[in-house]
Amino acid sequence: MRAKGFGYGASPPEPDTSVNLRLRYGSLSHEQAAKYGYLDPPDPTGASQDNSTIPSDKAGQLAYTAALDGDPSRQRTVAIKDPVSGVEYGGQTIGSGCWAEANRQLFGTDNDYIQSVVDDQWLQAAAASTLSQAMASAAVIDATKSWAACMSAGGYSAQSPVEMKGKDWVEPRPGRTELQTAARDVLCRGKAHYDDVVRAADAAAQRAFVEQHSTEVAAARSRHAAYLAGATKVSSAG
């Protein structure tokens, strides 16, 4: 990008929200509930994307995008499909600009990069599926009922901890009601052992998935190790 006249502020590494492990179960601590209610706490790494290198004028932005992605006429889109079921997740564009060059350094070839996207999408879908299975298990349903009874005893009408984060809380947030509800939520989660039950059910569902697809998982793990080795080599080279 510098050779083409641009700086580049890379996005910080951050998992897709569907598999954000910090908040995977919607868990709250007493401290978090007291300070943030149901708002996401700040990223503990303090990382944020640096957009200062992107030109502010339209012509500059178009040139920046062209340098990053390459000539649109040379781009191609490859279908991304579940390697087991064949279900199509969508498409991934392969360009000819700096982004594509960087991917080739890390992954080796365009096909290797596409394979990394396939692996990533497949495992993200699996993580979402196992969590759904866990939430439908008898153990989690019982824990949810215990949590709801505890909330009701405190004067709060709620059916599941999952619904709390997505509620339309009064702005500006977090307000008094949200903070009080979040505090009761934490108390009731503890009494119902809700988080422990969900984690155990999710872990069991994940183990079953890995056992069922052991060959595919082992291959994806091997490829991932190779990608990490490539990234380490590029990073060490400066």
Image (cartoon, rainbow, N blue to C red):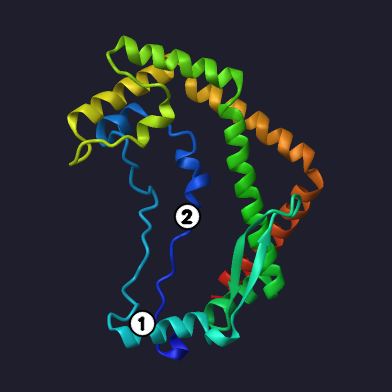
Residue 72, compared with residue 173, is above or below; it is below
Labels 1 and 2: the sequence-earlier one: 2
Q: Is residue 94 above or below residue 19?
A: below
- Residue 206 picture location, percent across and down: 67, 36
Number of marks in picture = 2
Residue found at x 24% / y 24%? 180
The residue mark sitting in front, 1 or 2, is 1
Name the residue beneath numbered marker 2: 14
Q: 45 or 67: nearer the eye? A: 67
197 relative to 12 in the view: left or right? right
The quarter of the picture where residue 212 lies is top right
> Where in the figure is residue 13, as x and y percent of width and height?
48, 58
Disc 2 secondary structure class: loop
Q: Position of residue 27 (x, y in %)?
A: 43, 31
Q: Which residue reaches farthest top?
A: 153
Q: Amino acid at mark 1?
A: Gln
Query: Quick check: 143 left or right of 124?
Result: left
Q: Toward the viewer: 153 or 33?
A: 153
* Kind of element beneath mark 1: helix
Residue marked by disc 1 = 61
